[in-house]
Image: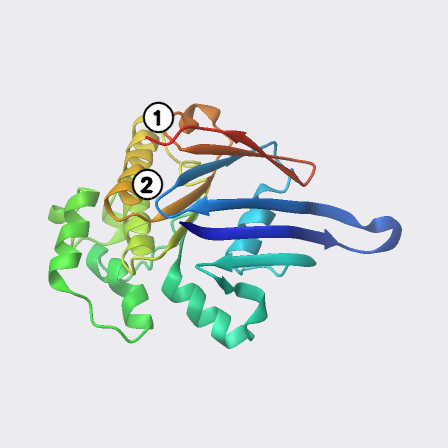
């Protein structure tokens, strides 16, 4: 079952002689529960691709459909609500709220959407993240790896259909990078969430289902085998 459909997606910055084609007719689909990685050189268009898929940037042309809903056919307010409920974001920088505890940071997206957190779900997620004993700690009391795990949990708490991770291991050492990969893998398998991750580290693609390469704005599918 295809959850994500990217069709003829283009993004051009500037115009005329100064035009830069950041994306050129990108086409691919992702299935429910699929874990895919996007690789490419710096400036190749990886982040532009992720931002357009997530509705953080508007493509010049093309379509993005999530579970059959066309993202850019929606009005901006409707798209914002849809994104908040169905897309989880993980960035290289953790973007945690310094004054909130681990648990408060975790449930913040639910509160923002006017939803009441389910205590059992929160407990389950804290256990999955290995943060049960840190639930009342502030971000300043956590290591970098622990802060990134909170950021991952915040992206997963709404049970989004799609999780977009932009260099989620960029600020972490080797062990913590592997821990992050384990968590993303578990999210795709345990919760059947589709994960699309940007990484410059090809060593981190060993466990993903599929690898996409972006070069000069052109997306190519390098394949992969689902377990």
Which residue is located at x 46 percent, y 36 percent?
Answer: 37
Q: How is the image coloured?
A: rainbow
Percent position of residue 215, x then y: 66, 34
From what the image shows, is residue 166 above or below residue 80?
above
Sequence-wise, which precedes: disc 1 or disc 2? 1
Q: Nearer the viewer, residue 41 or 131?
A: 41
Q: Are marks 1 and 2 in contact (CB under 8 Å)?
A: no
Query: What residue did someone put label 1 on?
Result: 174
Query: What residue did someone put label 2 on?
Result: 184
Q: Nearer the viewer, residue 103 or 211?
A: 211
Percent position of residue 69, x then y: 48, 65
Q: Nearer the viewer, residue 5 or 169?
A: 5
Percent position of residue 118, x then y: 16, 65
Which mark is in front, 1 or 2?
2
Which residue is located at x 43 percent, y 71 percent?
Answer: 81
Residue 69 placement, left or right of 214: left
Percent position of residue 206, x then y: 39, 25
Residue 96 lies in quadrant: bottom left
Residue 87 lies in quadrant: bottom left
């Amino acid at each position: 079952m295809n959850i994500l459909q990217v069709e003829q997606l283009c993004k051009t910055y500037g115009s005329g002689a100064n035009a830069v084609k950041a994306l050129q007719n990108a086409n691919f689909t992702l299935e429910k529960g699929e874990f895919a990685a996007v690789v490419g050189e710096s400036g190749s268009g990886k982040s532009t691709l992720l931002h357009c898929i997530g509705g953080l940037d508007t493509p010049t042309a093309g379509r993005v459909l999530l579970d059959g809903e066309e993202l850019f056919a929606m009005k901006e307010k409707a798209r914002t609500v849809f994104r908040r409920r169905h897309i989880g974001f993980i960035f290289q920088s953790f973007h945690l709220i310094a004054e909130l505890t681990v648990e408060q940071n975790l449930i913040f997206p639910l509160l923002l959407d006017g939803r009441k957190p389910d205590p059992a779900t929160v407990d389950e997620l804290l256990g999955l993240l290995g943060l049960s004993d840190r639930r009342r700690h502030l971000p300043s009391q956590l290591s970098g790896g622990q802060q990134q795990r909170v950021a991952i949990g915040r992206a997963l708490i709404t049970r989004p259909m799609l999780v977009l991770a932009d260099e989620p291991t960029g600020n972490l050492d080797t062990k913590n990078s592997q821990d992050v990969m384990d968590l993303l893998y578990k999210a795709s398998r345990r919760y059947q969430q589709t994960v699309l991750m940007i990484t410059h580290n090809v060593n981190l693609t060993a466990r993903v289902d599929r690898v996409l390469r972006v070069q000069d704005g052109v997306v190519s599918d390098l394949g992969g085998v689902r377990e």
